[in-house]
Image (cartoon, rainbow, N blue to C red):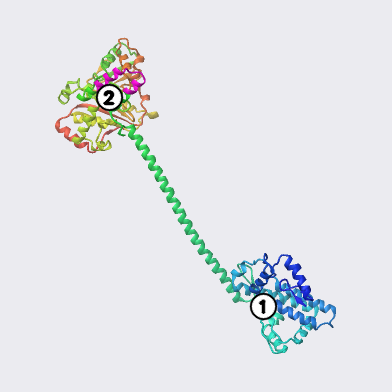
């Protein structure tokens, strides 16, 4: 009989084998009987079996030879004995050809020799057990005896391939060397089996199991090493991404800061876009282009401006005089809701022009304050022969004060330059300029709210105390000898020229705003002035809700020594804080 090397099926003749190979394995898909590998032709499958399953294939061939010998020497046996042998051989072949269901063709080469040995032991163990059970049912002891009595020259061991001189020597060899494969001794009945704790593979030898588990551990260690490398690469990539994100964020923040800084430069006139003269000419040209100014008027105003800049004196085109006197008359004859009012000395109102619109409020308020001081004989010594300067001249005067050593920090913030710019000035610059002229003054900082809803009632009280020393028993309208007060808050400045005390004990400031044009201020000069005309001057406690206010109050004249002392003190600028 012939046995198929691929599937183990036995046939009686060579033509039957060829037909079997053609029908089963050539036309149909060829599948490895040991590892279920498929997808190749017959020659490739034979090569695969010879190389990858040499031990299993040798075992099967040995059983096939034993089966052939048994078939030829047992013609006189009973049919049931032959049938039993065929069942045994078929079952043994099935057991030997079976493979672990969880192991694929790809996994076998990777596991190495250890897994092949374990698989081989497993297949032989299964064959041994099945053969033993069939021996009990079909009286295999007689068949086995006839197998070893049959002469086969030269006898070859079906398990290890050793060749002996005679069948008796081969039988002794098999019994001594391979007794555990054919006939399990009595001591093997209790032979322990070892399960792999990682993959469940059953091994008959503890040392084989140990090597098998060591392979698992090596694979696990190798996998952990790969994981550590991958983790390191992931951390490096995450670090690179974080650095890129940080660079991008810093770049965006830098661009945003630069944009905000340029916006502030434009807002405070530090963007090198020109100063008073350039803005005046540019705005007058716009008026001419829009048809609101005749070209001849443009040239006349340009000539006046150039003359004013040349001599450094304001041309007076934005000035309104006589308002304090008009207020005195109004409060004497009307304003029945007012209990008492205090007015500063006479002061002129100056409003912004084409040349300083949007940034010149600080300069215009200084002109108002100076117009009051020039009328006061107490200041003739320090202001003798002085006129109201134009804005570029005021800028030059502040720069001269910086050169003397006043307020170096403020000078640094403005780059030590005001002329030719539209830079704003505030309470510190006004203080610096007045002190350099030997005018005694000080700054009071109302740095936070002192009343409900963000109001500053302490500011009103301070101004009231400044203008009045004795409120009881004084006349309704008091024209004091006090100069006006410079009032600064974020983004704008104004001039306080008086304060009202109403019959309901509330206070109201009288304020000159440089943003108010002359035509509105001139309405206050009318003989029949109405209370509605004062609306632009009156500011109640609820009208002043900025976060912070600063005032510059004039107190007298400085001596030369006091001026030097204040210049030294201005190295670190300080102000009186309320509260």
Nearer to us in this view, 393 or 484: 393
Is residue 342 positioned above or below 570 on the image? above
Separation (CA) of disc 1 from disc 2: 113 Å
Indicate whether residue 542 is drawn in magenta: no
Of residue 421 and residue 402, the one placed in the foreground of this image is 421
Which comes sooner in the sequence, label 1 or label 2?
A: 1
Query: Which x, y percent locates residue 75?
Result: 83, 82
Q: Secondary structure at mark 1?
A: loop
Q: Quadrant of residue 441?
A: top left
Count residues near mark 1 (Cα–Cα under 10 Å), then give few for <14, some for 14-19, many for 20+: few
310 sits left or right of 260 in the view = left
Q: Which mark is residue 364?
A: 2
For residue 101, which quarter of the picture? bottom right
Q: Quadrant of the C terminus?
A: top left
Q: Position of residue 57 (x, y in %)?
A: 68, 75
Which residue does the numbered mark 1 point to in the structure image?
Answer: 191
Instruction: Name the one closer to the observer, 507 or 435.
Output: 435
Q: Secondary structure at mark 2?
A: helix
Numbered circle sitting on residue 333: none
Residue 513 vs residue 326, the one in the foreground: 513
Marks 1, 2: nearer the viewer: 2
Q: Please state the extent of the stretch shown in magenta in the rendering.
A: 284-305
Q: Position of residue 542 (x, y in %)?
A: 38, 24
């Amino acid at each position: 009989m012939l046995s198929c090397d691929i599937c183990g099926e036995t046939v009686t003749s060579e033509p039957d084998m060829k037909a079997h190979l053609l029908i089963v394995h050539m036309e149909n898909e060829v599948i490895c009987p040991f590892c279920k590998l498929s997808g190749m032709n017959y020659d490739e499958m034979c090569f695969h079996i010879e190389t990858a399953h040499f031990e299993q294939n040798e075992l099967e061939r040995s059983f096939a030879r034993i089966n052939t010998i048994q078939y030829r020497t047992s013609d006189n046996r009973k049919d049931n004995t032959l049938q039993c042998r065929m069942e045994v051989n078929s079952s043994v072949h099935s057991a030997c050809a079976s493979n672990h269901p969880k192991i694929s063709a790809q996994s076998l080469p990777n596991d190495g020799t250890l897994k092949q040995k374990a698989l081989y032991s497993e297949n032989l163990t299964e064959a041994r057990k099945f053969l033993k059970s069939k021996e009990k049912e079909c009286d295999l002891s007689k068949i086995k005896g006839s197998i070893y009595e049959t002469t086969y020259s030269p006898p070859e061991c079906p398990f290890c391939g050793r060749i002996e001189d005679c069948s008796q020597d081969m039988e002794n060899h098999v019994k001594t060397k391979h007794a555990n494969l054919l006939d399990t001794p009595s001591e093997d009945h209790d032979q322990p089996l070892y399960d792999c704790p990682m993959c469940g593979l059953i091994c008959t030898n503890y040392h084989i199991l140990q090597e098998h588990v060591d392979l698992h551990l090596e694979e696990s260690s190798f996998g952990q090493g790969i994981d550590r490398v991958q983790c390191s690469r992931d951390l490096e990539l995450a670090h690179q991404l974080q650095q890129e994100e940080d660079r991008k964020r810093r770049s965006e923040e830098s661009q945003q800061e630069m944009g905000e800084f340029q916006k502030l430069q434009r807002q405070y006139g530090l963007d090198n876009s020109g100063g008073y003269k350039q803005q005046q000419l540019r705005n007058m040209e716009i008026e001419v282009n829009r048809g609101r100014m005749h070209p001849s008027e443009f040239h006349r105003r340009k000539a006046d401006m150039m003359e004013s800049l040349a001599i450094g004196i304001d041309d007076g085109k934005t000035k309104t005089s006589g308002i304090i006197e008009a207020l005195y008359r109004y409060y004497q004859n009307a304003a029945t809701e007012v209990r008492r009012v205090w007015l500063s000395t006479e002061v002129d109102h100056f409003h912004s022009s084409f040349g300083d619109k949007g940034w010149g409020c600080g300069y215009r308020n200084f002109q108002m304050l100076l117009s009051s001081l020039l009328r006061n004989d107490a200041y003739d010594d320090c202001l003798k022969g002085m006129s109201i300067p134009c804005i570029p001249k005021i800028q030059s005067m502040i720069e001269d004060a910086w050169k003397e050593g006043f307020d170096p920090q403020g000078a640094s913030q403005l780059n030590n330059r005001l002329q030719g710019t539209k830079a704003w000035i505030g309470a510190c610059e006004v203080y610096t300029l007045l002190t350099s002229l030997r005018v005694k003054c000080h700054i009071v900082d109302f740095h936070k709210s002192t009343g409900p809803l963000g109001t500053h009632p302490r500011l009103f009280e301070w101004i009231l105390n400044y203008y009045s020393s004795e409120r009881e028993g004084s006349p309704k309208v008091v024209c004091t000898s006090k100069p006006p007060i410079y009032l600064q808050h974020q983004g704008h400045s104004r001039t306080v020229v008086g304060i009202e005390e109403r019959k309901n004990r509330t206070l109201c400031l009288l304020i000159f705003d440089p943003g108010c044009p002359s035509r509105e201020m001139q309405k206050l000069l009318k003989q029949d002035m109405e209370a509605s005309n004062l609306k632009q001057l009156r500011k109640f406690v609820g009208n002043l809700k900025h976060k912070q206010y600063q005032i510059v109050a004039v107190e007298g004249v400085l001596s030369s020594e006091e001026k030097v002392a204040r210049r030294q003190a201005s190295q670190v600028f300080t102000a009186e804080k309320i509260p």
